[in-house]
């Protein structure tokens, strides 16, 4: 039976809780990952994901025909760069609307109290944790130290004979 350790990624992109979301979003995009553990003093204190970034932007795409930038692109663009700035300023909406979401610290958007798994956990149990919690990635921890991360894709590859 395969374990989490057999399929996990050991070279994990991490971030600190005081980092700005714009910096973290850029790093996630550069590494082509959709989330990362938040680490403080060597311990996992949270996880930040695309969903957390979307919640920060409070974007609800109700019409599938509307184009929206990726959360990474949107966070990197200060709101003051948008063409509706003059209109919003004239109508007194600028102060509230112009908040530079990119400067928000990760601790304000991360999922706190993350579910972690040990490297020795059987892969089917990790899959069960993902299904029950709805998490797409689980930090892998041994003796309170981050040693890897396992994603839905890792689990599926491992269960289908890959990896």
Image (cartoon, grey):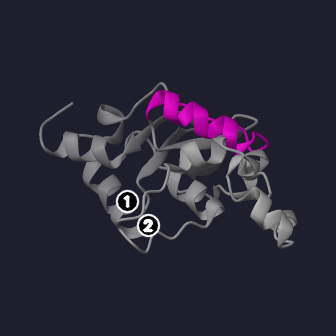
When asked about the image quadrant of residue 127, the answer is bottom left
Q: Which residue is mark 2?
A: 133
**Percent x, y of residue 89:** 84, 64
Quadrant of the snapshot with the C terminus? top left
Tell which of 41 and 79 is nearer to you. 79
When asked about the image quadrant of residue 153, the answer is top left
**Percent x, y of residue 66:** 42, 64
Q: Is residue 148 left or right of residue 16?
A: left
**Percent x, y of residue 40:** 74, 39
What residue span does the magenta drawing correspond to? 13-32
Tell which of 122 and 86 is nearer to you. 86
Q: Is residue 120 left or right of residue 109?
A: left
Estimate how packed mark 2 is, as few (under 14), some (14 to 19) or many (20 or more) residues with alpha carbons within 10 Å: few
Query: Against 109, is 96 above or below?
Result: below
Q: Is residue 9 left or right of residue 127?
A: right
Q: Is residue 85 visible?
A: yes
Identity of the residue drawn at 58% across and 31% down: 27
Identity of the residue drawn at 75% across and 42% down: 20
Q: Is residue 1 visible?
A: no
Quadrant of the snapshot with the N terminus? top left
Q: Are marks 2 and 1 in contact (CB under 8 Å)?
A: yes
SS under mark 1: helix
Identity of the residue drawn at 64% across and 47% down: 75
Is residue 118 one of those drawn in magenta? Answer: no
Q: Which residue is mark 1?
A: 130
């Amino acid at each position: 039976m395969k374990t989490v350790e057999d399929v996990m990624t050991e070279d994990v992109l991490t971030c600190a809780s005081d980092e700005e979301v714009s910096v973290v979003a850029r790093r996630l995009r550069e590494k082509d990952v959709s989330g990362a553990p938040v680490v403080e003093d060597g311990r996992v204190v949270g996880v930040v994901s695309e969903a957390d970034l979307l919640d920060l932007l409070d974007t609800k795409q109700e019409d599938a025909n509307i184009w929206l930038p990726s959360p990474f692109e949107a966070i990197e663009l200060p709101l003051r760069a948008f063409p509706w700035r003059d209109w919003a300023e004239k109508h007194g909406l600028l102060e509230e609307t112009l908040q530079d979401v990119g400067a928000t610290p990760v601790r304000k958007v991360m999922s706190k109290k993350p579910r972690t798994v040990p490297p020795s956990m059987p892969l089917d149990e990790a899959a069960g944790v993902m299904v029950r919690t709805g998490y797409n990635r689980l930090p892998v921890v041994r003796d309170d130290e981050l040693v890897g991360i396992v994603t839905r894709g890792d689990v599926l590859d491992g269960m289908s004979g890959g990896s």
